[in-house]
C-alpha cells in the first residue's frame, strides 16, 4: 500500500466529525469554515460556524445582510477583518450571479481570499490538485522529508509542495490536503508526535532520528509590541455601558466598545478618561485593575476607568447604551474582560453630569 493510500484510509477512519465535512461539500460552507478556522481553535469555531450558517445559509442571505449583522455573528472569533471581507465577497459574488469560482486562481481574486483559502476550497470542494500549505502540512512534510530548510521559506516550501503533489498523483487532491491537515492537528503535533499510530511512519525520515520535533527548525519570531491603553466605562442607572463603534485605526474597527485610547504618560489618567467621554463627567472616577488583551502581535495592558452616572441620558449620535453582559452589537472579547474587571465599581454614583449632546432619556 502506498503512503497516499495509507494516509487516506487513516483519514476516512479517524476524521473528526465537523459540521462542514458533508458529502458533497457545500462551497459556501467550506469557505466560511476555512476563514473562521484561520488562527482560531476548532472548538471555538464549530458553534460559531453553526450559528453563522443558520442565520446566513448561503451567499445571497449574507450579501443581503448588513456588515454589522455579519460582524455580530463573528463575535468571539477575532480577526474581524476576515468577516468584513467575507461580507464584501458575498456581495460581489451575489452581484455576479451567486456562484463561487471553481479554481484557486479565480478564488484568489475575491476579497479576503489568500492562497491558502483558495487552495483549500478549490481542492476540497472542486477537486483541483493544489496543495494547501498550512502550518500543520508544513510540519508533517518537514518531518517526513527530514528537511534541513524551513518549510515557511522558499526552498523548504518547494520541497514540501513537491511531496504533497506526489501524494496527489495517487489520491484525490482534496482528501490528501484534508488528511494532511488532520494528521498535523491530531497525530504529528508540534510537541509530542504520536509516531506509533501514524499512517506515514513507514516512510518518515524524522522518525528514524532521535527527535522528530527537531523539524521544522524553530521560527525566528519578532517581539510583540507592548501597548498601554485606558478604557472608560460609563455605567447608567440600569447597568448599561456607553459604547461607540470604533471607526478608526487598524484594529477593532467596526466593533462596539467603551471609549479607549493609548495612555498619555504626561497626563493624569482620570483627566484623560474624562476627555474621552462625549459629555462632562463632573465627579470622581475610579481606576480599576488592568486587564491583558492580545491582538495579532500586539500585547495590550488596558486600564479600565469606571464612572457611574445617576441620570438616564439618551446616547449621543454614534454611541449606544448596551448591556455589557449580553451585548446585542458586534464587539470584541475585550468587552467581557472589562466586564469581569468591573466587580468593584465605585460606591458613590457620580452626581454631576454636564450634558453635551442628547438629553434625559
Ligand atoms: S512518523 Fe511521527 S514525525 Fe513522522 S509524520 Fe508521523 S507523527 Fe510525524
Image (cartoon, rainbow, N blue to C red):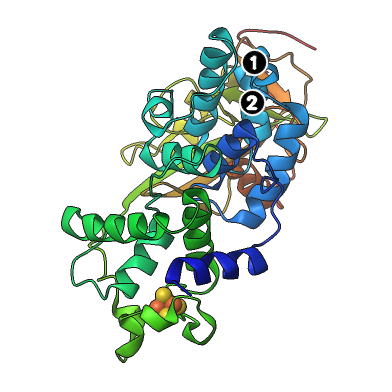
- Tell me if the residue at label 2 has its CB under 8 Å from ligand 1: no
From this view, report whether residue 283 is shown above or below residue 347.
above
Crowd band around label 2 with a 10 angstrom C-alpha radius: few (<14), some (14–19), many (20+)? many
- Local packing at callout 1 (Cα closer than 10 Å; few below 14, some 14-19, many 20+) is few
The reply, left or right, for residue 191 in relation to residue 91 is: left
Q: Quadrant of residue 222?
A: bottom left
Q: Which residue is mark 2?
A: 70
Q: Quadrant of ligand 1?
A: bottom left
Q: Nearer the viewer, residue 41 or 247?
A: 41
Left/right of residue 309 with respect to residue 128 in the rendered view: right
Q: Quadrant of residue 182?
A: bottom right
Q: Residue at x 63, y 16 (%)?
A: 63
Question: What residue lies at 83% left-to-right and 30% top-to-bottom?
Answer: 238
Image coordinates for residue 258, horizontal then vertical, percent: 59, 31
Q: Is residue 57 left or right of residue 265?
A: right
Q: Residue at x 66, y 68 (%)?
A: 13
Q: Quadrant where the C terminus lies?
A: top right
Rendered image: mark on residue 66: 1
Furthest-bottom residue in this view: 210
Marks 2 and 1, how far apart in space? 7 Å
- Residue 55: image x %, image y %? 76, 28
Residue at disc 1, secondary structure: loop
Question: What residue is shown at x 78% (from left), y 21% (from top)?
Answer: 311
Disc 2, disc 1: CB below 8 Å?
yes
**Where residue 31 sits in the image (x, y, percent)?**
56, 35
**Above or below — where is 349 with respect to 143?**
above
Q: How many circles with numbers are drawn on the protein? A: 2
Residue 349 visible (yes or no):
no
**Above-or-below relation of 313 to 179:** above
Determine whether the residue tagged by mark 2 lies in a helix, strand or loop.
helix
Q: Position of residue 123 (x, y in %)?
A: 48, 43
Work out which residue is located at the far right of the displayed protein and give it: 238
Amino acid at each position: 500500500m502506498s503512503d497516499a493510500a495509507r494516509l487516506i484510509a487513516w483519514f476516512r477512519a479517524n476524521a473528526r466529525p465537523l459540521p462542514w465535512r458533508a458529502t458533497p461539500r457545500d462551497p459556501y460552507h467550506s469557505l466560511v469554515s476555512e476563514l473562521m478556522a484561520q488562527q482560531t481553535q476548532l472548538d471555538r469555531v464549530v458553534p460559531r460556524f453553526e450559528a453563522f450558517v443558520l442565520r446566513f445559509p448561503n451567499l445571497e442571505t449574507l450579501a443581503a445582510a448588513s456588515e454589522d449583522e455579519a460582524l455580530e455573528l463573528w463575535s468571539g472569533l477575532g480577526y474581524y477583518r476576515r468577516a468584513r471581507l467575507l461580507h464584501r465577497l458575498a456581495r460581489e459574488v451575489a452581484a455576479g450571479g451567486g456562484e463561487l469560482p471553481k479554481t484557486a486562481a479565480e478564488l484568489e481574486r475575491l476579497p479576503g481570499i489568500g492562497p491558502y483559502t483558495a487552495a483549500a476550497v478549490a481542492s476540497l470542494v472542486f477537486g483541483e490538485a493544489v496543495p494547501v500549505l498550512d502550518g500543520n502540512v508544513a510540519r508533517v512534510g518537514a518531518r517526513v522529508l527530514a528537511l534541513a530548510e524551513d518549510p515557511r521559506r522558499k526552498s523548504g516550501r518547494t520541497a514540501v509542495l513537491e511531496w504533497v503533489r506526489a501524494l496527489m498523483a495517487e489520491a484525490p487532491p482534496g482528501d490528501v490536503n484534508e488528511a494532511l491537515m488532520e494528521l498535523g492537528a491530531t497525530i504529528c503535533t508540534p510537541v509530542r508526535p504520536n509516531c506509533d499510530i501514524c499512517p506515514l511512519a513507514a516512510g518518515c525520515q524524522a522518525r528514524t532520528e532521535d527527535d522528530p520535533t527537531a523539524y521544522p527548525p524553530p521560527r525566528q519570531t519578532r517581539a510583540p509590541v507592548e501597548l498601554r491603553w485606558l478604557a472608560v466605562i460609563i455605567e447608567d442607572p440600569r447597568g448599561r455601558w456607553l459604547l461607540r463603534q470604533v471607526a478608526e485605526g487598524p484594529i477593532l474597527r467596526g466593533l462596539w466598545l467603551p471609549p479607549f485610547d493609548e495612555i498619555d504618560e504626561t497626563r493624569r489618567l482620570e483627566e484623560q478618561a474624562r476627555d474621552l467621554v462625549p459629555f462632562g463627567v463632573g465627579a470622581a472616577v475610579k481606576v480599576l485593575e488592568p486587564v491583558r488583551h492580545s491582538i495579532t502581535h500586539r500585547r495590550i495592558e488596558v486600564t479600565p476607568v469606571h464612572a457611574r452616572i445617576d441620570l438616564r441620558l439618551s446616547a449621543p449620535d454614534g454611541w449606544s447604551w448596551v448591556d455589557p453582559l449580553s451585548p446585542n452589537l458586534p464587539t470584541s472579547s475585550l468587552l467581557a474582560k472589562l466586564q469581569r474587571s468591573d466587580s468593584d465599581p465605585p460606591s458613590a454614583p457620580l452626581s454631576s453630569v454636564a450634558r453635551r449632546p442628547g438629553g434625559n432619556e
